[in-house]
Image (cartoon, grey):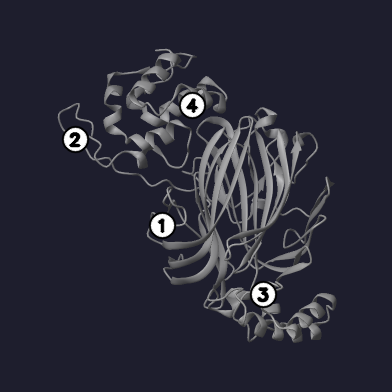
């Protein structure tokens, strides 16, 4: 049966799967073999034979006529579009009929995959460019070399993405590329007041020729960009324990420092089903304390770490420095003095007046419950290197805060490649990492502002996110069509550590996101 006939059959049975989508899928995965693998994972071996001698082609048997009854309509469209959000088994309809070839049905028992915990130095890619899947609590255990990549150079994607946030505002930095286009950008937004404060993005043509990013997230290094009215410098030192991010444009300036409070991170290498040479090498670092300041057109946004927030004993609201006509003149003068004088004595005095001032204003009103939650700022790093399929969809959720006065964080996600050997799901508490298996992140795609739910397969995670802000980003340019809904808000629920200890999560600020990428 020809590829064209296969497209025709799919179009007849599933009208929403257009011929154009089929062509995009085929071109995106890069080869007929990869496309056949997509079909193979969709309908499994009982429906398809993909290999004859040294050639591979699709030969569907008569059972394909019952395919529409065995796999739910909406989910099959997602799978055909190249999504790797879940394995096929989780997409079979609840009412799917079992194989009755011998006149009797047999239950299929799910075999839980064993994750590969990497504890010694391991190469990300083999000499043939095939990824070696696994996870580690330290990204330095993975040895990555760009020379080992066996893929077209325009398929490589690399990025360093940082976030600095507290209970009110988030500051995000992007330094990365998708080979044919790159981005150096900064964004500041208030997710309580649901507004973007500042955005500056520099889109760069063919950055793969000159943008050299590090092979490890823990390397001491300096990344710098200075063009088009923007200067950004990211300095990593002390083997990744301390990071400084500085940025300046005509209207914006910031200087923040991130310090690790937990020696553990979550790092993983996963393949993609579409091609044996596609992979994702990623490390995410939670639980970094953050301190510093961002200034937009003369207005300061100050981020304080734990030691700095201890000085604000009477504070119960956010620390945004925001001029307001509602404030009395003495408070405004105190704030102006703070901006001009960095002495600790002046800062403490101004902070006391600032607390009283904000108690009368609308900034942070009825938002903060606990002083530490309100004032303490946290840093996050998402460090990624890989060769991705054209189409991909993922869910990602992350947060850091305090539970019972102790540093707590989590990283949860699905859709990042084939995760039978490694997932990125884990909890961080008191300097330790607690590993999780597969998770589900559930949202209403018709209304992202409704409550999100996060669950794992072992019953150790039962969290909910109450969104306050949808940081939606879209990129449409030539063949690129990306859209992300990153929902910020408060998490609440219960999680269980490795030893069974349950932690009550309440009023920890973070985000959950859903991304669809055609890139």
**Residue 64, image quadrant:** top left
- How would you rate the neighbour count of disc 4 (Cα within 10 Å): few for under 14, some for 14-19, many for 20 or more? some
| Dot 1 and dot 2 residues touching (CB under 8 Å) | no
Residue at left 63%, top 32%?
129
Secondary element at tag 3 = loop
Q: In the rendering, at what x and y percent does residue 120 appear?
A: 62, 50
Residue at left 62%, top 51%?
283
Q: Which residue is at the front of the view, 216 or 398?
A: 398
Residue reaching furthest to the front: 325
Residue at mark 4:
21
Q: In the rendering, at what x and y percent does residue 310 appear?
A: 67, 82
Label 3, label 4: how far apart the Cα atoms are: 48 Å
Rendered image: mark on residue 319: 3
Image: 159 above or below 292:
above
Give the mark nearest the N terminus, 4 or 1.
4
Q: Is residue 215 visible?
A: no
Label 4, label 1: how far apart the Cα atoms are: 32 Å
| Dot 4 and dot 1 residues touching (CB under 8 Å) | no
Give the mark nearest the N terminus, 2 or 4.
4
Nearest to viewer (mark 1 / mark 2): 1
Rendered image: mark on residue 455: 1
Label 2, label 3: how far apart the Cα atoms are: 63 Å
Rendered image: mark on residue 105: 2
Give the mark nearest the N terminus, 1 or 2.
2
């Amino acid at each position: 049966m020809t590829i064209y006939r296969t497209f025709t059959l799919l179009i007849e049975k599933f009208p929403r799967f257009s011929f154009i989508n089929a062509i995009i899928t085929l071109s995106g995965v890069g080869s007929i073999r990869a496309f056949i693998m997509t079909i193979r994972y969709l309908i499994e071996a009982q429906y398809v034979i993909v290999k004859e001698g040294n050639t591979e082609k699709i030969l569907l048997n008569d059972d394909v006529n019952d395919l529409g009854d065995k796999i739910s309509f909406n989910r099959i469209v997602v799978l055909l579009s190249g999504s790797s959000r879940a394995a096929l088994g989780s997409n079979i309809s609840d009412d799917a009929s079992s194989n009755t070839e011998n006149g009797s049905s047999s239950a299929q028992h799910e075999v839980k995959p064993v994750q590969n915990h990497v504890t010694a130095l391991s190469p990300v890619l083999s000499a043939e460019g095939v990824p070696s899947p696994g996870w580690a609590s330290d990204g330095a255990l993975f040895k990555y070399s760009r020379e080992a990549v066996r893929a077209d150079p325009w398929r490589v994607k690399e990025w360093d993405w940082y976030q600095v946030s507290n209970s009110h505002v988030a500051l995000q930095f992007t330094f990365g590329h998708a080979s044919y286009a790159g981005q150096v950008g900064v964004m500041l937004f208030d997710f309580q007041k649901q507004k973007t404060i500042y955005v500056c993005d520099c889109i760069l043509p063919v950055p793969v020729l000159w943008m050299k990013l590090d092979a490890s997230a823990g390397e001491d290094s300096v990344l710098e960009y200075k063009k088009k009215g923007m200067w950004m410098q990211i300095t990593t030192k002390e083997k990744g324990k301390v990071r400084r991010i500085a940025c300046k444009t005509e209207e914006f300036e910031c200087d923040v420092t991130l310090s690790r409070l937990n020696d553990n991170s979550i790092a993983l290498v996963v393949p993609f089903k579409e091609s044996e040479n596609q992979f994702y090498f990623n490390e995410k670092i939670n639980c970094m304390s953050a301190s510093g300041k961002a200034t937009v057109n003369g207005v300061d946004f100050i981020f304080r770490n734990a030691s700095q927030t201890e000085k604000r004993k009477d504070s119960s609201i956010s620390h945004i420095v925001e001029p307001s006509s509602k404030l009395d003149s003495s408070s405004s003068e105190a704030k102006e003095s703070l901006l001009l004088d960095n002495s600790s004595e002046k800062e403490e005095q101004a902070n006391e007046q600032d607390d009283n001032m904000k108690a009368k204003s609308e900034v942070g009103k009825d938002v903060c419950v606990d002083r530490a939650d309100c004032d303490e700022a946290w840093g996050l790093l998402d460090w990624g290197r890989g060769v991705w399929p054209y189409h991909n969809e993922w869910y990602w959720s992350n947060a850091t805060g305090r539970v019972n006065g102790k540093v707590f964080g989590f990283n949860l996600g699905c859709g990042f490649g084939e995760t039978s050997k490694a997932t990125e799901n884990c909890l961080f508490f008191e300097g330790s990492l607690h590993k999780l298996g597969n998770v589900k992140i559930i949202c209403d795609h018709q209304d992202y502002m409704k409550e999100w739910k996060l669950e794992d397969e072992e019953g150790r995670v039962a969290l909910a996110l109450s969104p306050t802000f949808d940081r939606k980003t879209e990129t449409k340019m030539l063949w690129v069509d990306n859209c992300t809904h990153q929902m910020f808000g408060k998490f609440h629920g219960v999680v269980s550590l490795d030893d069974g200890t349950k932690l009550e999560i309440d009023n920890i600020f973070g985000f959950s996101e859903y991304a669809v990428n055609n890139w």
